[in-house]
Image (spheres, rainbow, N blue to C red):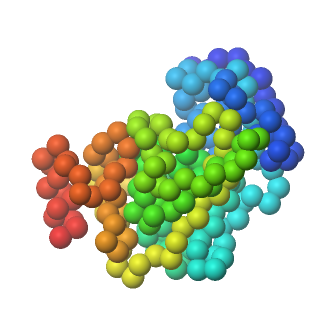
Amino acid sequence: MKPAPFEYAAPASLDDALALLDEDSRPLAGGQSLVPLLNFRFARPTRLVDLNRLPDLDYVREQDGTLRIGLLARQVQLYGAGRWPLLVDAVDHVGHPQTRNRGTVCGSVAHGDAASELPAAMLALGATMHARSTRGTRAIPAEEFFQGYLTTALEPDELLVELEVPAQPAEWRFVEYARTHGDWAVVGAARAGSRTAYFGVADRPVLAPYEIEDPWKRAFLEAKLA
């Protein structure tokens, strides 16, 4: 299938991009999640706002003991976040090299898929999501960001411009079961210190304790996290 007709815009500044966003528009960064939705016509925006020309937003850097991840940082860049091995392990389970080279970290988090690795890792690490619109900026804790199936706290006119990840605890685990490596996870968990986030068990990534209804998924996680 092909996407429904839409207007295409490629702004050269973040302010110009924000001015184009509304409830009938969708931002495009890596496109690994959005393009399939467009092709199957599950998403039918009247305007597509291409963010790839925006300058200085493709960073992954440590600052004052925290990890800062910019809007256009590609997933592959997380391999350089050696002091956050949970993120390194999580991203290694995301798709394949071709998709990690193009997909963005913020895009994956903003998509909020319940079976996705990076949203769960951000939840386990207690990340803060920094959103921006023409109305201003706001910081959203990970616990409040994921709200339901492919639904986050972002408003239609907001962009997730930065992820702020605190220092990772020494104790961590990442486990996942997928039918083939790189495929969507059936179930998994990310643990950072005393916080454990499950994915593939609800309509969003969730923190433990959480009552997992599926007995096989519950048994898998109990065995792997023991």
Query: Residue farthest to the right?
Result: 12
Q: Can residue 217 be seen in the rendering of this structure?
A: no
174 vs 208, nearest the viewer: 208
From the viewer's perspective, tell me whether residue 34 is left or right of residue 175. right
Q: Residue at (34%, 51%) from the top-left corner? A: 206
- Residue that appears at 38% across and 44% down: 204
Q: Please state if 115 lies on the left or on the right of 27 as rendered.
A: left
Which quadrant of the rendered structure holds the C terminus?
A: bottom left
Residue 94 image offset from top left, x and y in percent: 47, 55
Image location of residue 71, percent across then percent down: 68, 54
User: Closest to the observer: 74 or 145?
Assistant: 145
Q: Quadrant of residue 105?
A: bottom right
Residue 91, horizontal then vertical, whole percent: 49, 61
Q: Is residue 105 left or right of residue 146?
A: right
Looking at the rendered structure, the number of numbered marks drawn on it comes to 0
**Residue 161 rendering spot, x and y as whole percentages:** 67, 53
Q: Is residue 66 visible?
A: yes
Along the line of sight, the residue nearer the viewer: 137 or 97: 137
Depth check: 185 or 160 in front?
160
Q: Quadrant of residue 203?
A: top left
Q: Residue at x 64, y 76 (%)?
A: 62
Residue shown at 78%/32% (left/top)? 20
Image quarter where the N terminus lies is top right
Q: Residue furthest top?
A: 5
